[in-house]
Amino acid sequence: MVQKQIARSGVTFRPNSPPVLKYSIKDLEQITGIKAHTLRIWEQRYGLFSPNRSETNIRRYSNEDLRMLLNISILNANGMKISRIAELSPDEMRSEVLAISNRNLEENLQIDNLVLAMVEMDEDRFEKAISTNILKKGFDFTIRNIIYPFLVKVGVLWITESINPAQEHFISNLVRQKLFTAIDGQVPKFGNHTESYLLFLPDQELHEISLLYYHFLLRQSGQKSIFLGQAVPFEDLEKVFGIHKPKNLLTVLTSPLPGDGLQVYIDRLSSTFPNSRILVSGYQLVQLKPTLPENVVQFNTPADLVALMPVL
């Protein structure tokens, strides 16, 4: 059954080395947005997938199944009937998706296209999608409305273990390059109301893409942004603070902290830097909803952060 599906999808493999089947139907639902009930109907009616089943009858899907479903979801969302999609070969599906992506710059489609680039680890697809949007809609629009929402989705997929570390690192490095280019292009334009911001991630926190994006926003808005990056020990944070004495500290809390670590960390920031405003964001805050001391402010979107900046 698995070999039949591999032949259908055009995937080649070495004897005795079948692709790893690792995704549950809930994973596919999380990544693609297609309900599990719909996926089961597509399996039964059109034979699009042939998942393996565990001894307890749990479906397990391969990387190839996921790639095919991402293509299918984009085609279906853009008006192609599932019965027509089922007649296409994998190469034909890919060609149709690329054609749609080139002519339709609607944000959700572009985000789905980037998810597909991440899953396939396809740098050419990523570069083409980003370059096309920058050319037609501008760099700032592309960063705000495509790359940032895409990063939010990647963060959720990472936390829920729906993507693997290699996929996350691959796409993060590509996005990081774009953000560094954007940051380097910002010419300081400090004014009378410019404030200083110290940007950092807690010790052992490595997911710095969102922090880089906030660094870009602050620079673009004429604020003084001091970027420390990932995995900053608290003692080092105190030393840098002593040198610059910023009015604001900003951090993103994505990965879980052990036990009551989130609340403890926030309380420690508040008590150590009582005269600074501490801006916090990230998945853990949304999920755990810690109690925020008076000088700690939560923001959830780039627009929230911009609203917290002084008007120059």
Image (spheres, rainbow, N blue to C red):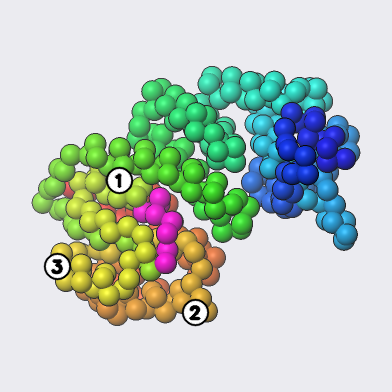
- Please name whichever residue, 225 or 9, is drawn nearer the observer in this view of the structure: 9
Under circle 1, the secondary element is: helix
- Magenta segment, prevailing SS (helix, strand or loop): loop
Rendered-image quadrant of the N terminus: top right
Badge 1 or badge 2: first in the primary sequence: 1
Which amino acid type is shown beneath numbered disc 3?
Ile
Image position, residue 252 (x, y; %): 40, 60
Residue 271 in magenta stretch? no
Residue 208 in magenta stretch? yes
Which amino acid type is shown beneath numbered disc 2?
Asp
Which residue: 41% across, 34% down?
A: 142
Measure the C-alpha gap from mark 3 to mark 2: 30 Å
In the rendered image, which residue does mark 2 sit on?
260
Under circle 2, the secondary element is: loop
In the rendered structure, find residue 243 and report the number of the disc placed on it.
Answer: 3
- Please name whichever residue, 47 or 290, is drawn nearer the observer in this view of the structure: 47
Mark 3 burial class by Cα count in 10 Å: few <14, some 14-19, many 20+:
few
Of circles 3 and 1, the one toward us is 3
Q: Left or right: where does residue 196 sit relative to residue 113?
A: left
Q: Is residue 29 visible?
A: no
Mark 1 burial class by Cα count in 10 Å: few <14, some 14-19, many 20+:
many
In the rendered structure, find residue 216 and report the number of the disc placed on it.
Answer: 1
Image position, residue 288 (x, y; %): 53, 70
Residue stretch rendered in magenta on the structure:
204-211
Do labels 3 and 1 touch, CB within 8 Å?
no
Image position, residue 238 (x, y; %): 24, 73
